[in-house]
Image (cartoon, rainbow, N blue to C red):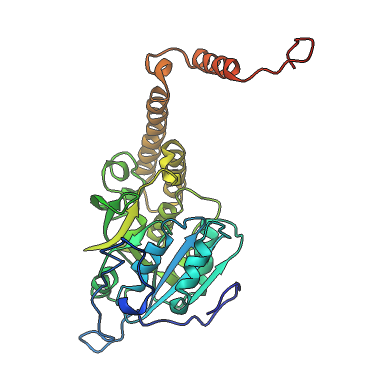
């Protein structure tokens, strides 16, 4: 076990363990990845070539409720050349005890304060040695057989990003829906209204990307803590990447009340700002096309803000002026606050 270090490593790959080799599942837990495992994939492809090494990174902070399921979904992939890194930001909720249970199969793990999710993922990418990589957050999972099915479709193109299918699950891992992206170009990516927010979006856990290529474009932006995956796809497009859709069920995205994507207003502002920056960097777009895209982003931002305001409460919904609504809300909060009095009865 190698823990509590943050160094460039000659990372060990692993042979994915069998189900029987892992710690027993908690009482009452059944199905994938508790009592089921993936098929096993041969070490070499039909043409005799070795399988590309895949690096998987799990950034984590206080996700003890879900992290064991995440870890097992990666270890039980049955893929012949896998390295797995867990970079925990110093959790105090029992996550570390869970990670230690599986430390024998990890290439590297650490638990200490860090500079956030993007920083942790970038460190994992730099430590890795895989041809391809992905990150699986500690409340998400890989699907059963995800890597062996995706691995059969990877053709070692150093500029190819492979996008599968993502399943949405709830807090109890119950299936909610299934989604596949439809983004094929940077222009698709930055058309937030007509493509990304019209069902074409890419869900991060369904993606495998070339690790060194991602590092060559700077990896994740540590200053973008909301749409860093979206920004990475844009930087890869700008550098000439092609996106291939494989129809493989790869990722499982968990919806729960504590995730930051629930703040749709903040998420949308970040999305639009990032799309605008990417469009401005795309030299191959004509000036007419670029202006059309940016104008549409600006209109969408205004429309979204107006619609979001209308859902913020009854007074906003009926159309009262915003200053009046804000004043009334402030007054209501003031009245609701407990008032302290001195012995003479004057408020403090």
Q: Position of residue 299 (x, y in %)?
A: 38, 31
Image point 27% across, 76% down: which residue?
155
Instruction: Give left or right: position of 161 versus 278.
Output: left
Is residue 132 among what the camera can see?
yes
Looking at the picture, tell me which residue is in the foreground, 168 or 11.
168
Looking at the picture, tell me which residue is in the foreground, 52 or 290.
52
Q: Position of residue 149 (x, y in %)?
A: 23, 71
State the image quarter where residue 173 is shown: bottom left
Looking at the picture, tell me which residue is in the foreground, 135 or 259.
259
Is 195 located above or below residue 284 in the figure? Answer: above
Is residue 158 among what the camera can see?
no
State the image quarter where residue 48 is shown: bottom left
Looking at the picture, tell me which residue is in the foreground, 342 or 119.
342
Question: Which residue occupies the extreme top position in the image?
Answer: 345
Is 98 located above or below residue 10 in the figure? Answer: above
Please tell me how many numbered marks the rendered image carries.
Answer: 0
Is 299 located above or below residue 197 in the figure? Answer: above
Question: Which residue occupies the extreme bottom position in the image?
Answer: 48
Q: Position of residue 161 (x, y in %)?
A: 33, 65
Image point 36% across, 35% down: which residue?
296
State the image quarter where residue 306 is shown: top left
Question: Which residue occupies the extreme right position in the image?
Answer: 344
Quadrant of the snapshot with the C terminus: top right
Q: Position of residue 91 (x, y in %)?
A: 55, 58
Instruction: Give left or right: position of 208 versus 117.
Output: left
């Amino acid at each position: 076990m190698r823990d509590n270090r943050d160094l460039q490593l000659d990372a060990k790959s692993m042979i994915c363990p069998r189900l029987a080799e892992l710690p027993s599942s908690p009482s009452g837990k059944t199905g994938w990845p508790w009592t089921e495992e993936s098929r096993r994939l041969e070490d070499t492809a039909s043409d005799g070539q070795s399988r590309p090494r895949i690096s998987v990174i799990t950034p984590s902070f206080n996700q003890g409720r879900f992290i064991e399921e995440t870890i097992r979904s990666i270890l039980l992939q049955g893929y012949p050349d896998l390295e797995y890194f867990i970079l925990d930001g110093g959790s105090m909720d029992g996550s570390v005890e869970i990670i230690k249970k599986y430390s024998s199969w990890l290439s590297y793990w650490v638990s200490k304060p860090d500079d956030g999710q993007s920083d942790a993922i970038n460190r994992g990418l730099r430590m890795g040695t895989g041809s391809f990589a992905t990150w699986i957050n500690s409340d998400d999972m890989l699907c059963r057989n995800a890597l062996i099915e995706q691995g059969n479709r990877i053709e070692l193109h150093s500029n190819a990003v492979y996008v599968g299918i993502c399943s949405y699950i709830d807090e109890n891992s119950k299936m909610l829906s299934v989604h596949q992206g439809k983004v094929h170009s940077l222009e698709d990516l930055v058309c937030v209204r007509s493509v990304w927010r019209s069902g074409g979006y890419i869900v991060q856990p369904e993606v495998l990307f070339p690790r060194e290529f991602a590092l060559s474009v700077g990896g994740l932006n540590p200053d973008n803590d909301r749409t860093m995956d979206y920004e990475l796809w844009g930087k890869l497009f700008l550098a000439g990447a092609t996106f291939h859709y494989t129809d493989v069920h790869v990722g499982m995205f968990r919806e729960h009340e504590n995730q930051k994507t629930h703040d749709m207003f903040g998420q949308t502002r970040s999305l639009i700002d990032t799309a605008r920056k990417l469009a401005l960097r795309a030299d191959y777009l004509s000036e007419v096309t670029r202006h059309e895209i940016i104008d549409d982003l600006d209109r969408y931002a205004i429309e979204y803000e107006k619609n979001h305001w209308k859902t913020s409460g009854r007074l906003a919904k009926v159309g009262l002026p915003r200053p009046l609504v804000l004043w009334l809300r402030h007054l209501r909060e003031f009245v609701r606050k407990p008032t302290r009095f001195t012995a003479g009865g004057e408020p403090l």
